[in-house]
Amino acid sequence: MPELGNLALAIALILAVYSIVANIYGVRRNAPDFVVSARHAIWSMCAMVTIAVVVLWVALLRSDFSLEYVASYSSTTLPTAYKITALWAGQQGSLLLWTWLLAIFTSVAAFQNRRRNPDTAPYALAVLAGVAIFFLLMLNFVTRPFDLLATIPAEGADLNPLLQNYWMAIHPPSLYTGYVSTSVPFAFGAAALMTGKLDDGWIRSTRRWAIFSWFFLSLGNIFGARWAYEVLGWGGYWAWDPVENAAFMPWLVMTAYLHSVMIQERKDMLKVWNLSLIGLAFGLTLFGTFITRSGVISSVHSFTESGLGPYFLSFLVAVTLAYTALLIFRSKQLRSPAEFESYLSREAAFLFNNLILVGITFAVFWGTIFPVLSEAVRGVKITVGPPFFNRVIAPLALGLVFLTGIGPLIAWRRTTADNLVRSFAAPVAIGVATGIACAAAGLRQWYVLTAFSLGAFVIGTVLVEFRRGMNARRHMMAEPRAKALVNLVAKNNRRYGGYVIHVGVIVAFVGIVGSSFFRTEVKKSVHEGDSFTIGSYRLRFLGFTEVDTSHFASATARVEVLGADGREITVMKPAKLFYIRAQQPATEVAIRSTPLSDLYVVLAGIDESGQTATLEVFLTPLVFWLWAGGLLMVLGTVIVMWPNVRERAAIATVLSRSSAATGDLADLAAPGGD
Amino acid sequence: MNIRPRFFIGAGLIILAIGYLIGNAMRTTSEYYLTVSEVAARQSELGGQAIRVAGRVKPGTVNWEPNTLTLKFEIVPIPDLNADTAPIKPVVATDPVATDPVSFRVVAAGEPKPDMFAPGRDVIVEGELGAGGVITATQVMTSCASKYKPKQAQ
């Protein structure tokens, strides 16, 4: 079986090379047969990589320890679900997953473009195949998933206990999906540069890909944070570890990109900027893969010293140079005649939002690679920790939140004072009222007050927008409220889905601010029957329950939680597990989540007598809203991605006639391509 | 009127502000990231400074007091990575503890012992170097969750 895997990967590599040659030859010599055959080669490549993935999965499920990979990341006692997820637990497997996703996305892009974009699609597919070639070279020659062991062990080393977790099962595939799908818009951008077809065709053709990618990058980051929160047991969810940063940076750049392309579509501006952003996003996904595998930057969870580093770095440098050269080569054609007209315009708000997002990206990048830079320049490694990131990003985040409120409501080109007052009076009032209410409730930190007020302001702007659109429909179409609302969203899903995403981001931001500023912590060593308080809760240690299975031994502390009125709310069960195969302890935290605050109990230690438990308890306000905001972002993205209703154009005409005055509703009518 | 210069002013201000934030945060939050041997070499100048030290937990020195959440151990230099992965290991590299006298005591109080923490593992210790070569740690991190070798494989 392993031979089949190796063979499939070798054939996939050959097919990828062939598809480039056939695509380029076919499009240059105007020989459509070759383009068709290149497409078939891409589909066959995808089939080959799929076979390799299936072979590895079968080996994992059958516990075939003749494979080094299976012996390193699985065991006979590992639950079946984690045998499946072990596919991406290690270096070779995760690269195989990466390649598989890339092959699938390339195949889908080939299918979508079988009749569309005849001039550019072959180039884009060639670029995608080029990326696939790099990964297939790695899998064939450098980090081979199907290498055999000379002596077959009776038992595998087991999957790292930290990875034996639900969130770890879904976090890497989500993140990888987000990472890999940036390569489709990137490839079409590169194709636009190669062919000189520099209108916004490449953006329109890959709009859904960009949103898809952003969506999965968001999910990947949220799942990763959730995993850290539930598994790592330190009460937090984000530590500015290089690997986390590596996942965060492409998300920031894609967020900037999704906004700035709107300016190009509307105003034919920022062409170079958009092409640069998508190049940057793609480069950062490679960079992320590079730093997690090279060992160049020490991280709490990296696949260090694998020997892949130099290859990734070379590929990254080559891609960057080639892409930059293309941009310079086309720079004359990329000049745009349009100009910004006023600070008080949507394009200005979007431009500043882009600058801040890219600025945050740069700060994260700088903080991540600073140890390497300082060692190269000054001969000593200097590192910056979470305080650096918090200090730089916290104020920038406020600016971004502010622009999130401004951007959607302000008109394109320029806005009149009258219009400003009309659009922003209510939201500003909501923001100020929230600030006053928070201050009255005893909040004193200026940052928190500002953040909450701005958050309320943004949500206010969204409410105003929904109301305005709904009323327009009620008058024009004589629809009842609920129907008007549903139709409003259904027929302008990009715009209103976007608003829902904004609300999600703001809600998550409020959760982050609340949980960062107001977390309290108590550590206590307790005997059976001892109790102590945190916040309004009283916690009592009831004793241990011990469980032994063939896979692990565990001690669970039963902790009774009493409310302020002395009544029992629940019994929480934080635990220590000891994985027998891995000879490795693991901590299972107990979390009781409410919208107001999370009670988070860690069994930090058990003394040798087995009588005393040391509990570490965190009370974290508002962290619930981080996950709720994530959910809203998901909902909003689903609305944005929802297949569009044809009626849109007709509605649009009616709406634009109703209120051409502000120019805002005319936006509603803008058929956003697709 | 040409608005372009005014936009460059706005964009420039944002870029300057970001640059200022980064510079300012660098000054106040950076700390040395050193290996055990580097700490030994610069011990005199590092006293009282925030440092991060990468080292290996010396077997036989670990003392964990669960009631007070106090973890004490010694760290020694991590053997050369190349020596570690070379097909034929140099004889000295097999027992770095015996051949290398450099070590620092680490006292970490108030934090749970990380699950991945074990004698012989590589750790990153964050804290302050005090008198007598004792590092008072605020945090002990174990590295490489994705690439660990269980005991039986060693």
Image (tube, helix red, strand yellow):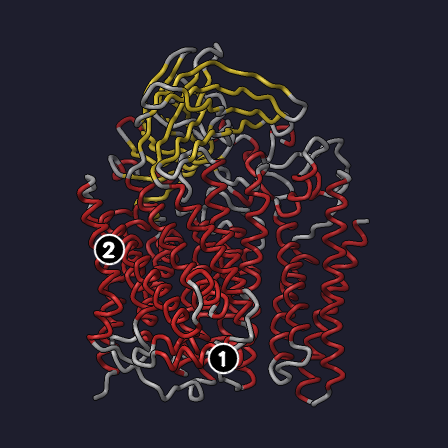
Q: Helix, strand or loop at disc 2?
A: helix
Say which residue appears at 75% left-offset and 38% top-offset: A63
Residue A189 is at least partly visible in this image: no
Q: Position of residue A548 (x, y in %)?
A: 63, 19
Task: Tell me which residue sits at (36%, 68%) in the image.
Answer: A471
x%, y% of residue A507? Answer: 37, 51
Which amino acid, by three-letter code, is at mark 2?
Gly
Q: Are marks 1 and 2 on the same chain?
A: yes
Q: Is A650 rendered above or below residue B36? A: below
Residue at screen point 38% across, 50% down: A508
Viewer-closest of A662 and A541: A662
The residue to which callout 2 is attached is A431
Q: Secondary structure at mark 1?
A: helix
Q: Amino acid at mark 1?
A: Ala
Q: Which mark, residue A650? A: 1
Q: Nearer the viewer, residue A210 or A294?
A: A210
Asked if residue A257 lies left or right of residue A137, the reply is left
Image quarter (top left, top right, bottom left or bottom right) of the C terminus of chain A: bottom right
Labels 1, 2: front one: 1
What is the x, y in percent for residue A253?
A: 43, 64
The residue at the point 65 percent across, 22 percent down is A549
